[in-house]
Amino acid sequence: MSHAPDASDNPVLDQVVRELDVILANAGVGVVFVKARTLVRCNQRYADIYGFASPEAAVGRSSLELYRTEAEARELGRRAYPVLAAGETFRVEQLMRRQNGELFWTHLTGRLINPDDPAEGSIWIVDDIQDRKEADATLADLHAEQQLILDHAMVGIVFLRGRRVTRCNRAFEQLFGYDPGELDGALSRAWYLNDEDWKAAGDLCYEPLSRGESFHAEMLLGRKDGTPVWCEVRSKAIDRSDLSRGSIWITQDITARKQAELELVQAKAQLEALVAQRTLELSQTVAELELKMAQQQAAEARAERLALFDGLTGLPNRHLLADRASQAIDIARRSDEPLAVLFLDLDHFKNVNDTLGHRVGDSLLTQLAARLRGAVREQDTVARMGGDEFVLVLPLTDIAGAAHLATKLMTLASAPFPVDGQELMVTPSMGIAMFPTDGDDFEALCKCADAAMYRAKRDGRNAYRFFTSEMQAQSARALQLENALRRALERQQLSLHYQPQFALGEDDARCIIGAEALLRWHHPDLGWVSPAEFIPVAEASGLILPIGEWVLREALTQLRRWDAAGLPPLTMAVNLSAVQFRHDDLPELVGRVLDEVGMPAERLELELTEGAAMDNPSVAITVMNELHARGVQLSIDDFGTGYSSLAYLKKFRVGKLKIDQSFVRDLTEDAEDRAIVDAVIRMAAALGLQTLAEGVETEGQLAFLRHQGCQAVQGFLFSRPLTAQAFAEFVLAQVAATSAAAPLSAYAL
């Protein structure tokens, strides 16, 4: 590379250099000369952009440090090289780094000094575009928010400028029968029935819009196929000081309402004419006819009420409900209008009948029916399906309207019911399905609303939920699992894995004290199915009872096999579902299986969740007392995730609280989890209960639990759940490894 001549020897060149320096010093963009990835020379603007104290401070620095990472710098070089080598200019927007570490967006323009010899270096022009990038992002967010409003609005929205469409949403196109985008740029004349109506509309709206006021009217407009449609329209100028900027119009179809009003007027006129004619013709026999009519109407009303109305509440029964719902859905389908179906079920209503009697329950249902009837409109239908289940069919109700009514019904149903001098409190669970999104007929909508109601119950009750496509998929999956699960036992697809449980002694001593039996299911087509998925299906279908009995018998039988194989005496922990715990003969079943297997009751520990225990505490106490009397150990599983009452906890005949792994997982990082675990351990100690922590995976978690006085642990730090054979090998290996250091009876690890 040749050296430039001494500027002092050439006045002209000296002048050019000075002019170039002035240009570079005052340029609005950064300019830099880079050679071998080293900054050779730059102007003041370049130094300012990257945060150098001066252009001289940048000289000699590596260009790699100006990028977020060296990899990004080299990737840019890889993309730029073929363009620069061809003698062309390379342009790109690149995220770079200032000297203070701040990342910012730049626009880079580069070119080689000599394409024939890239080693001579390159010149780059740098423009800081961070402010523009942020402005673009803000504008994009605003546009996205506006588009969401347009796309999801339930009414037609159109923007006009010069009475031409600049933008409209899909609801507006559908209202007037146009395809997507078909109205773009069209005159608003497209949805008027004639030129006179179009001109009159322009004259009517000009005055209020020019004053900055809203224009509101009901207009007879026309769809693309010429069909007239009554619409309620509202409009406002975007800028009243400059009407040329256009206006926004919101349009809603009110044809059904107008038609209903017209039919009502016509029916009234026809009825008045008919009455007048009949009165004139039959004036001599009117008394006899009125008597016969009254008798006939009374008889028909009695027959209709017996056939179509609920005898207790006076509400339509399921037959009348199906008829009214089908009619409402047909109207909604023809008019392209929304409709909602709402299922309402009282939480734990069976307890009212069982404890206070059916007469009290019937009084409560009658009062609830009156509240529901008073909360809805005349065109809505409230029906009783039976028991404590009610169904509401709500024409002309969109999602927002359904949610509003559901909230109102929550308040009404939760208010006290006065019965026989006492006030009863119940809570409702509700499910909502929307036409036509969730179903095209009443049967489909009922299934969806029913599924949504059960979702509300699973989520804690005293709530409402809308049906979703996810629930539909879950429902189909649950049905598939239920059908497969019915044959799983006889086809020997179920198995048990066992996770070791350890007692914590002093000086890091750890002793195997038992195993938790964990149910596993491997289906030839579905593969391994998670217990979190199939256990709820088994509970809902009642299959959990035979499966639970099999688990209990298999676990205790395996314990007997381990005893015979020379394993130390261990405790077998078996989980109980809420359905099993509520079953009447649970204590007898447990005793029978223990006798059949020949296993002492104290070797069995039954684990039940807080929810199962608190569902009906008085019954839970009775069942626990019977199991305790037989010598069976009891523990509360996943403690801390439910809603235990300390007043009941001290009455439960349990000997252990199992701390849920969700609190153990972040013990070393989360101060709140540490406080919760510490409180549970202290509370258990005060109540004379043992504690076992689940999900222990790190030495740090173990150290904290040991220090706080937790007596036992289980988790991946020690062992994953193992097959029966692998569990036996694991225990015997640990015993053999430590037999020289401690008596065999201690089984210390």
Image: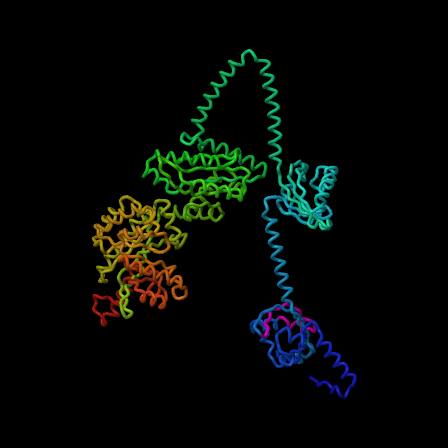
Q: Residue furthest right?
A: 12
Tell me the colour scheme of the image: rainbow
Q: Residue furthest top?
A: 284
Numbered marks: total: 0
Residue 4, picture quadrant: bottom right
Q: Nearer the viewer, residue 603 or 134?
A: 134
Expressed as whole percent of the image width and height from the top left, the position of residue 62 reads: 60, 78
> Residue at the spot x=57%, y=71% of the render?
102
**The C terminus lies in quadrant:** bottom left
Q: Is residue 649 above or below residue 90?
A: above
Q: Is residue 460 left or right of residue 271?
A: left
Expressed as whole percent of the image width and height from the top left, the position of residue 403 reads: 50, 44
Q: Residue furthest bottom?
A: 9
Asked whether residue 647 is drawn in magenta, I would say no
Q: Is residue 635 above or below residue 292?
A: below
Q: Nearer the viewer, residue 346 or 172?
A: 346
Q: Is residue 79 above or below residue 464?
A: below
Expressed as whole percent of the image width and height from the top left, the position of residue 699 reads: 35, 68
Expressed as whole percent of the image width and height from the top left, the position of residue 119 reads: 65, 80
Read off the magenta span. 79-99
**The N terminus lies in quadrant:** bottom right
Q: Residue furthest front?
A: 421
Q: Nearer the viewer, residue 637 or 113?
A: 637
Residue 352, picture quadrant: top left
> Residue at the spot x=25%, y=67% of the render?
748
Q: Nearer the viewer, residue 398 or 323?
A: 398
Residue 661, picture quadrant: bottom left
